[in-house]
Image (cartoon, rainbow, N blue to C red):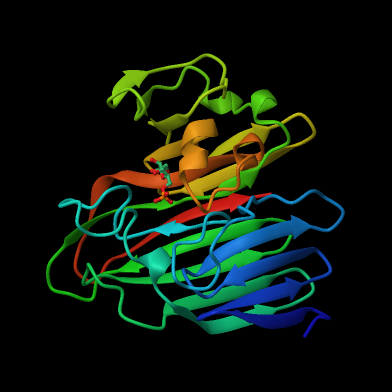
Amino acid sequence: MSNTSLIYRTVGKNKILQINHAKFTAELSLYGAQLLSFKQTEKPPILWCSNSAVLDGTKAIRGGVPICWPWFGPSKDGKAPQHGYARITFWEIANLESNQDSVTILLHPAETIVGTELTLSVRVTLGNNAKIELITQNPTEVSHPITQAIHSYFSVDGIEHTQIPSLSDVEYIDKTQQSKMNTEHQLNVDREIDRVYLFSQPKLELIDSKRSFTISGTNHDSVVVWNPWVEKAQSMADFDSTGYKNMLCIEMANTSPIEIPPSFEFVLSQTFG
Ligand code: TA6
């Protein structure tokens, strides 16, 4: 076992695991199976988490890497929670492996995830970078559709300088404009942006005023980019008032329904850092 320290702290009904490894530090919330922070040694933090986030297991946590499953966005009938139940479910660690290079954590739900007969496991692999895998399985005799997203909140230094060159001129669904199709040559975050880019390439680069890092994915059909800007951020009690200036959500997602056949496994992943 490497000299990695694993320390739990209890916050209300939730338990948060602090991981101190030679290569990184990280925090993982068992509520939502949600990576809250990831910082490579001698580098700035990769993830953003609201100072007003509710961590006690009573509300989806505003920041880190929320898991949207078994649907992304509003539920079909609008009566169930936005982004599904995985991020408001309590999880447990089924397996944890640690060595000098990385820590790999497999999480299973500690309670039934309502809203689907499919099952989900989450694998988090932390080392030189961070990888999140949503492992969907279908134990039933019929296929079921899902949409999903790895809803990562990235920490950026100055949102007005932040660029994602790979998304230049890529078509996107603009959810701030009644889902009109649009393109933009150069990302310019100076208002609320809520976009579903029709981008399934394996990787993109996030560049801000001080650094850049790669964000890659597998099996996504789109990349969601979101910044609430001032008014929407102020309308959310768990979004600290100036946080919008230092965050950008970039999410590998399946925003079009995918059918999971009986006995099949489907893995959506995102890697960053
Ligand atoms: O991923 C973008 C989005 O779907 C936005 O429309 C916004 O609702 C955001 O997710 C946050 O959703 P939440 O339910 O976490 O407040």
Question: Percent x, y for residue 251?
Answer: 48, 44
* Closer-to-camera residue (238/156): 238
Task: Give the answer, above or below, for where 60 lies relative to 184.
Answer: below
Q: Residue furthest left?
A: 142
Residue 111: % across, % down: 35, 82
From this viewpoint, which residue is outermost toward the top? 185
Q: Is residue 156 left or right of residue 202?
A: right
Q: Can residue 201 be seen?
A: no
Residue drawn at point x = 24 percent, y = 48 percent: 257
**Residue under the point 46% across and 42% down:** 235
Picture quarter with the N terminus: bottom right
80 left or right of 244 in image: left
Give the image quadrant in which the ligand numbered 1 is located.
top left
Above or below — where is 75 with respect to 168? below
The answer to which quarter of the image holds residue 7 is bottom right
Q: In this view, does 18 lie above or below 75?
A: below
Q: How many marks?
A: 0
Residue 252 in percent (x, y) is at: 46, 46
Q: State left or right for residue 197 relative to residue 25.
A: left
